[in-house]
């Protein structure tokens, strides 16, 4: 009787929520892995990558820097 090879299962840790998942997406410039549960033709049930980038974008907008030469606050 022949033995069948076991199939490889890859699990990664999500950079946003910290859970282990088999369905994931990787970001190129940051090399981070995010979980994504998605059925084609429907909205994703769980998409940590878009949540991560939305949160990161909001934090950068709220950051304010005071200029040394003037009393005005500069926001980026």
Image: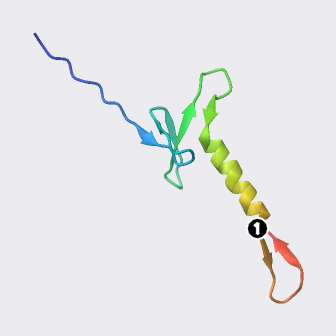
Q: Residue at x 80, y 88 (%)?
A: 68
Q: Which image quarter holds the N terminus?
A: top left
Q: Which of 18 and 58 is in front in this view?
A: 18
Say which quarter of the image contains residue 49.
top right
Answer above or below: position of 59 versus 25. below
Circle 1 residues within 10 Å: few <14, some 14–19, many ≥20: few
Q: Is residue 41 left or right of residue 17?
A: right
Q: Which image quarter holds the C terminus?
A: bottom right
Residue on which disc 1 sits: 63
Q: Residue furthest top?
A: 1
Answer above or below: position of 10 versus 4. below
Q: Which residue is drawn at 73% across and 62% down?
A: 60
Q: Residue at x 50, y 50 (%)?
A: 32
Residue 25 location (% of width, % of height): 52, 39
The secondary element bearing badge 1 is classed as loop
Residue 74 location (% of width, % of height): 83, 74
Say which quarter of the image contains residue 59.
bottom right
Q: Nearer the viewer, residue 55 or 40?
A: 55
Residue 55 location (% of width, % of height): 69, 51
């Amino acid at each position: 009787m022949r033995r069948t090879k076991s199939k490889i299962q890859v699990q990664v840790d999500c950079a946003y929520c910290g859970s282990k998942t088999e369905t994931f997406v990787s970001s190129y410039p940051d090399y981070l892995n995010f979980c994504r549960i998605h059925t084609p033709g429907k909205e994703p049930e769980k998409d940590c990558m878009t949540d991560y980038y939305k949160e990161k974008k909001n934090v950068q907008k709220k950051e304010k820097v005071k200029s040394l030469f003037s009393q005005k606050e500069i926001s980026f």
